[in-house]
Amino acid sequence: MRFRARITSKSVLELFIQVSGTVTKLAKVCVLRVCPDRLCFCPTGLPGEARLWGEVKRGVFHHFCMEGVSEEFNEIYLELMSEHLARAVKNAGSASSLKLQLTNKLRPCLTVVVELPSCPGHTRAMVHDLPVKVLPRRWWKECTEPRVWASDVSVYLPSLKTLKNMVERMANVGDRVLVEANLNGKMNLSVETDVVTIKSYFKNLGNPPKAVTGATQGEDPENMVQVRVDNRKLLLFFEGQQINPTVALCNILSNTLLHLVLVHDGVSLQYFIPAS
Amino acid sequence: MLKCGMTGGQVKVFGKAIQTLSRVSDDLWLDPSEKACSEVCEFLSFNIWLYSVLVFVFSTISMVTLSHDEFKLQIGNKGIKRTHNVYFQDSQPLKILFEKSVCANILMIKPRLLSEAIALLTSNQEEITFSVTPGSFCLKSSNGESLDLSSSVYSEMSFGPEEFDFFQVGLDTEVTFCFRELKGILTFSEVMHAPISIYFDFPGKPVVLSIDDMLLEANFILATLADQPSRVSSPQSLCFSQVQRRSDPTQSNAQVGKSQASQTPESISRAAPKRLFPKEPLDSSSATETKRVSTNQDNISEVPESVVSDMEEGPGLSCLRKFSCMFFGAVSSEQQEHAGHPLDSLATASDSEEDASG
């Protein structure tokens, strides 16, 4: 088993730091899945069956090479403490390079090497050996990529900051928030109690192309597709996530699932909240 | 009898010094002399208890009075004068003989660089290691003891000689000492806007962290872990040797014969001649010059770990019982005459000898 990867692009470095930071805010333990074409973050133990899935495509790495457990099963699953990784890369924002390598130093480690500029013309290397557990194959099924059902509606999200503020305020009022959207680029967030209902209306958001073709013939595009989810889970994601996405959208499977997708340059973050 | 008045700037320094020392121990030993007012803090020790008082008042102290009978802090502020009588006990003088200039390795660096590096190392460390070769300086954190995921991350960071204001390495070595104290000292040094000098040799011999400034001279002597197997500066062997050390302290301290005693400064004088890289001047000086005199003189070399831990203050200080002794000297604005021996003879205490119970 071998794994060695290096990031030299500043923007990718920034994204990697942000994804690690997000993961650590949502879960204590994370499984890093090293695949031939990408690196996946699979944090475990999120409350109430919510799931987070992060991916960094091979193409954004300056260098990426891996050799899995076997030819047939060409992947490596590494379990580690999210905080260890987040802390190791946290100050790498000004680094000239970030290297990840699977090593064996008395026990398996993910060695993170951050090259920082010191005096002009010199760099300083910071090395962290993160203890990891190499998961045997029988545990791999715990960390499969979440299945994305064909959604009933898909819409681009409004500004994440605005959303976060809304959800924060709504969390003060009620436990569950209703998220609904339609194929005309409209999205509503609402929370309801015996005494009060608060509803936010977003329009002109636009729908991703897929959704349009997936629409059932004759269905009214004004029709709102709904799902009610736990407010805290939603808030956890908005508070924890740090990336500034170029694409942010949400898929709703009627009364079943809310699926948020954030993408930036080969790095993606997906969050799945089941209906409650 | 000391009567000492301070201006605002001096008060700030005095207060910061007390704060730094208070991070190490609850007890403080104050020794006034003509040229300097020195504060020494030590663990197995005395009951002068400045800490709680000074936390609140140091920012406005204007007069300190110390004599056989009383220890007063007087605060004058906007026409109101408050006097605090601080509880204290007389004690025997502490004589520390240590010549830092004969250390093989002398480094001087801006404290900010070290602080920044230390901040990048994972934070829940008890110990930190300095590892030097003529071409590099490396900061290393301790390695986790357990073999599960939650054990701490091992981190290291290298500096090149060009980052130091002064870089003299005569001895390839690694020394390990208490992380918490280093942090406190670096903070103090940053406040003073003065570079910090580091003097050290082989493991077991104390490391001296020195801050020299117009207003004061501070020397912090920290004991280092003794008798580590000779290491290559690679994490793997570091891990290995540390694991070995922790699981079997008697083995690693076999040379000294007493696993506990080797971790106190007293053992330095015994360990010194057997070190891996003996150098002429060190051999002759180490035996005598690292001796430390205190009221517990009889007991220190015999102190088993269990007793030491009884005397320690609280949780999180498990490393501190293995290390000890910080020394701080503050100078007045008058000229200092003692050339190169600021650590010498201090004021004589009274005749009454108090029992140093923890």
Image (cartoon, rainbow, N blue to C red):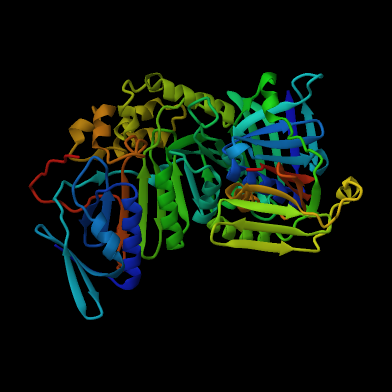
Seen in the picture, residue A203 relative to A229 is either above or below; the reply is below
The answer to whether residue B117 is seen in the rendering is: yes
Q: Residue at x 54, y 52 (%)?
A: B116
Image quadrant where one finds the N terminus of chain A: top right
The answer to whether residue B341 is seen in the rendering is: no
B105 or B75: nearer the viewer: B75
Seen in the picture, residue B50 relative to A276 is either above or below; the reply is below
Image quadrant where one finds the C terminus of chain A: top right
Q: Residue at x 78, y 38 (%)?
A: A148
Q: Residue at x 52, y 50 (%)?
A: B114
User: Residue B30, position in %: x, y?
Assistant: 22, 54
What is the quadrant of residue B218 in the picture? bottom left
User: Residue A216, position in %: x, y?
Assistant: 89, 46
What is the quadrant of residue B11 in the picture? bottom left
Count numbered badges in the picture. 0
Seen in the picture, residue A155 relative to A76 is either above or below; the reply is below
B260 or B295: nearer the viewer: B260
Most extreme residue toward the bottom is: B79
What is the quadrant of residue B4 in the picture? bottom left
| Residue A28 located left or right of residue B55 | right
User: Residue A213, position in %: x, y?
Assistant: 91, 47
User: Residue B231, position in %: x, y?
Assistant: 53, 27
A75 or B232: nearer the viewer: A75
